[in-house]
Image: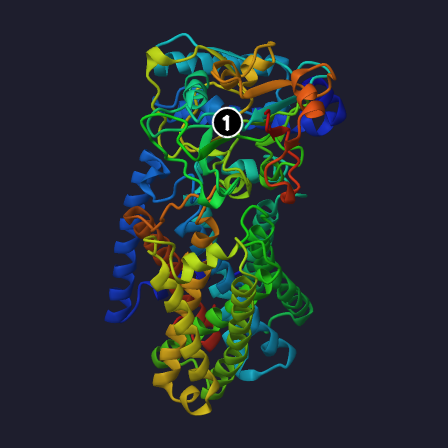
């Protein structure tokens, strides 16, 4: 075992960096501190510090959770081609994707924790110790699926990295079956998360079979969007080589998944508008508002417009291969899906509520600060993990040398 | 009921309990070592309290006594907390006469008082919807905030909504920790000391019957109803979901729910669904009843009807 060398080397790596690196770390730490302070206040006063109320009983936190499950699930999009087709350019990238999945799941768990009225009763959900209800509760299944996915990714990544640290090849015998398992696991976490909403008959906006496929389609846009940006940052700042071709291939795949996502959105809107039942009211609230209640209307349109623009930018080869338009597209997709899965999904589901009342929800300052804190925590964890993982992949950091 | 539960899963239940005790001992010794003077043993025991259904007789007694101690400290009032078991061969059912209700909301306030609900922020189990006669029962166009000089208002009728005590309760189904369940007498209850506050049940309930304590409930000490039940009207803490229990603390002792008792128009009916002679069964036989949102297959034990 070379655990001692690994720990000492990792600490050295993490504390060494350019000015930009330290600026980035400082910003994240400031935001984390602000988030903790806001959460402290929320814990003391109760969830009344959020904008959620009985009418809209889930909000920004659960929306962010849903979005991040998608990001975590999308890690498999990078895994599949790399391992099955043994694409050289993608193999190293997979480690980055799986690390992203790990940080996203950690953020998901934090979002669930801050949304709970009694986070200290968290142990009630642990099987055998608490009373986890596996069987009918989708939330219980979701917690199991997410934990399993977290452990799975952690095992794969740490095996590959630690082997590389010892200058050995990873064991195909163990890794390949685990990676194959992570494919259905990734699909499972996002499907189960969709079922969390999908299964609720009291909320017609969610009670649609299209929800799970739509979740997967949009996740397979937003996850790779983040990776496209990341790849460019990494190849500029490290010796990691990522070919243009790999990035363009990813962008092309995103064009197809975005098309599917838009198609499903269109199918849903058609059903609501044409059949014109009482259930149309939720879609109306998202895109047109009801009377003077129209706080989230701009977001509804923003998501739709961003998605459409990005689709064309990624579809047309010339704009896909131009890094300016490519990056614009990636940012638009990320934001579009972020709105679509957060505010655009959760809030119309609750507005109007089950007895027809309209309570206009918009995240409070506490919710925004806590959310920024959690995102910063995730980014910090990811940054630190990359800081160690990238040199290992490049062979710059192993038990013999720390360069 | 608890004894039966234990016989069904003797090993699991004992293992769990031993584990809990071991954890409790471990933590309390750590706590005492680190001189955490603010953490008294009641707080530690609250944290490690087992699920209501897993408590044996002695543990339940300890829990109830602890709650009484804690309430005494908090409100400086002697509050009695009991855990009355369900009555054999009784399943409660409720009837509401839409042709009689005048929307006076006396039920709403009697309920708040009886059930020790928070006055600020306001928690109310009953919501009365004002509907337009021209539209019929139309929830989307109803108004819960009507406030005229006098009720009933011309051209309107009223539909009070509270927990429908579903046979097929979506709230029970979604709970990830079994903190809510249906009792043998048909009442859907919550273990307020087990609820983690995830609010999945609130998303799932089609009747808006579940209420969350968004802040510390404010309850004036001189307005407390001191006769309380563990599963019913004992004062709640922030961060848990609560709901109508047909006044479990009253009905299990043979009394009517507070809302039935107060109603000045006699719109509210209550009784044993298993007893053919009961008022609720008589209504179901002689009037035409309907259930709310029948398409969701929740199968409520709460029946609306038009008495005249």
Could you tell me how many numbered marks the image carries? 1
Question: Would residue B245 be visible to someone looking at this image?
Answer: yes
Viewer-closest of A353 and A123: A353
The x and y percentages for residue B273 are 70, 21
Colour pattern: rainbow
From this viewpoint, is residue A166 visible?
Answer: no
Q: Quadrant of residue A179?
A: bottom right
SS for tag 1?
loop
Q: Classify mark 1: residues with Cα within 10 Å, few (<14), some (14-19) or many (20+).
A: many
Nearest the camera: A152 or A109?
A109
- Measured from the top left, where is residue A228 in percent x and y? 43, 77
Residue depicted at x 31% and y 63%: A15
Q: Residue furthest bottom?
A: A318
Along the horizontal axis of the image, is B185 left or right of A168? right
Going 41% across and 23% down the picture, which residue do you hit? B104
Q: Which residue is mark 1?
A: B192
The answer to whether B72 appears left or right of A19 in the picture is: right
Name the quadrant containing residue B222: top left
The quadrant in which the C terminus of chain B is found is top right
| Residue at 31% from the left image edge and 40% from the top image edge | A49
Residue A113 in the image: state x and y as whole percent: 44, 44
Q: Is residue B306 above or below residue A246?
A: above
Q: Is residue A76 above or below residue B232?
A: below
Left or right, A362 with reference to B130? left
Counting from the top left corner in percent of width and height, residue B191 is at 54, 27
Front residue of A254/A105: it is A254
Identify the image quadrant of the N terminus of chain B.
top right
Q: Which chain is mark 1 on?
A: B
Relative to A123, say whether A180 is above or below: below
State the residue at coordinates (50%, 84%): A246
């Amino acid at each position: 075992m070379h655990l001692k060398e690994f720990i000492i080397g990792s600490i050295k790596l993490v504390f060494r960096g350019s000015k930009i690196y330290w600026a980035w770390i400082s910003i994240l730490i400031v935001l984390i501190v602000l988030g903790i302070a806001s959460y402290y206040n929320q814990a003391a006063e109760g969830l009344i510090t959020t904008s959620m109320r009985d009418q809209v009983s889930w909000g920004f936190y659960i929306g962010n959770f849903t979005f991040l499950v998608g990001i975590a699930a999308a890690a498999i999009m990078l895994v599949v081609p790399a391992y099955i087709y043994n694409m050289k350019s993608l193999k190293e990238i997979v480690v980055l994707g799986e690390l992203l999945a790990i940080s996203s799941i950690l953020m998901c768990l934090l979002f669930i924790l801050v949304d709970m009225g009694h986070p200290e009763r968290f142990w009630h959900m642990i099987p055998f110790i608490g009373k986890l209800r596996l069987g009918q509760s989708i939330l219980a299944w979701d917690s199991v699926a997410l934990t399993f996915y977290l452990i799975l990714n952690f095992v794969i990544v740490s095996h590959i990295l630690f082997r590389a640290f010892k200058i050995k090849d990873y064991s195909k015998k163990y890794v390949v079956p685990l990676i194959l398992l992570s494919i259905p696991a990734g699909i499972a976490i996002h499907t189960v998360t969709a079922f969390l909403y999908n299964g609720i008959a009291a909320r017609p906006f969610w009670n649609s079979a299209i929800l799970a496929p739509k979740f997967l389609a949009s996740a397979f846009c937003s996850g790779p969007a983040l990776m496209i940006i990341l790849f460019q940052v990494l190849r500029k700042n490290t010796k990691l080589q990522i070919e243009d071709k790999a990035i363009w291939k990813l962008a092309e795949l995103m064009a197809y998944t975005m098309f599917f996502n838009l198609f499903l959105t269109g199918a849903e809107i058609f059903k609501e508008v044409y059949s014109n039942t009482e259930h149309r009211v939720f879609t109306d609230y998202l895109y047109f508002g009801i009377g003077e209640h129209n706080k989230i209307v701009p977001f509804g349109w923003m998501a739709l417009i961003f998605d459409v623009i990005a689709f064309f930018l990624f579809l047309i080869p010339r704009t896909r291969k131009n890094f300016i338009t490519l990056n614009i597209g990636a940012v638009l997709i990320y934001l579009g899906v972020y709105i679509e899965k957060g505010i655009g999904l959760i809030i119309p589901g609750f507005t109007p509520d089950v007895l027809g009342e309209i309570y206009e929800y918009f995240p409070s300052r506490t919710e925004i600060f806590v959310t920024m804190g959690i995102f910063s925590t995730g980014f910090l964890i990811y940054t630190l993990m990359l800081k160690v993982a990238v040199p290992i992949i490049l062979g710059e950091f192993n038990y013999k040398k720390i360069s | 009921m608890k004894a039966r539960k234990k016989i069904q899963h003797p090993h699991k239940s004992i293992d769990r309990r031993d584990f809990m005790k071991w954890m409790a001992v471990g933590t309390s010794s750590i706590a005492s070592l680190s001189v955490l003077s603010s953490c008294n043993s009641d707080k530690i025991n609250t944290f490690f309290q087992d699920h209501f259904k897993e408590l044996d007789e002695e543990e339940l007694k300890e829990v109830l006594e602890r709650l009484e101690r804690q309430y005494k400290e908090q409100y400086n009032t002697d509050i009695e907390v009991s855990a009355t078991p369900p009555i054999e061969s009784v399943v409660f059912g409720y009837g509401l006469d839409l042709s009689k209700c005048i929307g006076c909301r006396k039920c709403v306030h009697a309920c708040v008082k009886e059930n020790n609900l928070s006055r600020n922020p306001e928690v109310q189990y009953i919501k009365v919807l004002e509907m337009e006669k021209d539209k019929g029962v139309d929830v989307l166009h109803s108004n819960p905030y009507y406030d005229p000089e006098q009720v009933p208002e011309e051209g309107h009728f009223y539909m009070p909504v509270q927990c429908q005590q579903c046979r097929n309760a979506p709230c029970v189904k979604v709970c990830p920790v079994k903190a809510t369940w249906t009792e043998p007498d048909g009442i859907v209850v919550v273990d307020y000391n087990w609820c983690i506050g995830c609010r999945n049940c609130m998303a799932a309930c089609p009747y808006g019957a579940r209420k969350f304590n968004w802040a510390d409930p404010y309850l004036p000490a001189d307005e407390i109803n001191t006769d309380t039940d563990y599963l019913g009207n004992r004062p709640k803490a922030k961060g848990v979901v609560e709901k109508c229990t047909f006044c479990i603390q009253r009905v299990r002792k043979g009394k009517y729910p507070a809302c039935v008792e107060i109603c000045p128009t006699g719109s509210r009916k209550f009784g044993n669904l298993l007893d053919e002679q009961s008022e609720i069964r008589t209504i179901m036989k002689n009037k035409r009843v309907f259930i709310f949102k029948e398409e969701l297959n929740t199968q409520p034990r709460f029946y609306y009807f038009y008495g005249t």
